[in-house]
Image (spheres, helix red, strand yellow):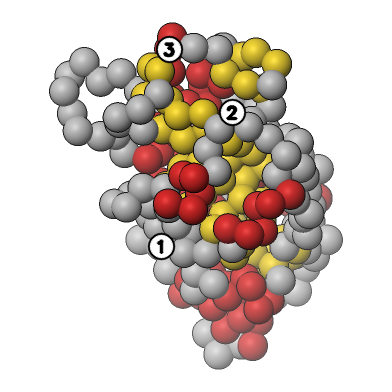
Amino acid sequence: MNPPITSRDNPLVKELKKLAQDNTAYRKQARFWVEGDHLVRAALTRGVVPELLLVSESFDALAHAQIAQAAIKTVAVSDKVFQEISGLASPATLGAVFALPAADLQASVNTVVLDRVQDAGNVGSILRSAAGFGFTQVLAIKGTAALWSPKVLRAGMGAHFGLRLLEGLDEADLAGLNLPWLVTSSHQGEFIHRQPLPNPCAWVMGHEGQGVSPGLMARATHFVRIAQPGGEESLNVAAAAAICLHASATHQTAS
């Protein structure tokens, strides 16, 4: 390995800083940045190999031998430069760059539709639930938080590497989705714990304030309600998604 890069003006450093801190830079570069041991290992577990591994001077190669040996290319930087790239209050000692995967919409697999879900933490949490409960495809309508942004990747905790993700879609792009559409509603439909759910299916999760759009609501084949004996008006969209996807994974019927 070459001596560590110590200049913040190095062209690679500038490029990686943008990738690590700009929520949409991955779209232009067709690659994305993840930081830390957990996310890199999650990728390797799924057979996804980084194009570039970036390590700081404090990186312990012996403790991370699997990661160090897997990358196509490894570059070292000083701790100060790594912190400059990371932008996090407590940077890790390693980060990695992966090629942005291409994906085509699959018509008949368990799917989550994100309708303008804007909070990165909510989106990442929903991706974790999708991966955990066997939903292999996530389709994001325009206005949804950037799926491969650093914040969503951190919140997803590695779920990205087990999912087919498509974003920037219009409602018309979902016409090829040949599945029952399920939408939660506070005023119509049976309680989710009292009914069998179709499998496979598509759950539509809506905007934090506005909910599911009228256009997508009109296409719903099933409406369900989540019992809230505590009397709250509504649930956070990520919490609602976890309940719905868990119910689908454990109370299924053929569609």
Q: Check disc 1 and give the amino acid type.
A: Leu
| Residue shown at the point (77%, 45%) measured from the top left | 106
- Position of residue 159 measured from the top left corner of the image (x, y, whole percent): 60, 41
Q: Check disc 3 and give the amino acid type.
A: His
Report which residue position mark 1 lands on: 88
Query: Which mark is first along the chain, 1 or 2?
Result: 1
Disc assigned to residue 169: none
Are the residues tagged 3 and 2 within 8 Å (C-beta)? no
The quadrant in which residue 136 appears is top right
Check disc 3 and report its element: helix, strand or loop: helix
Report which residue position mark 2 lands on: 132
- Figure quadrant of the N terminus: bottom right
Report which residue position mark 3 lands on: 193
Q: Check disc 2 and give the amino acid type.
A: Gly
Q: Nearer the viewer, mark 3 or mark 1?
A: 3
Are the residues tagged 2 and 1 within 8 Å (C-beta)? no
Residue 40 in view of the camera = no
In space, the residues marked 3 and 2 are separated at their CA atoms by: 19 Å
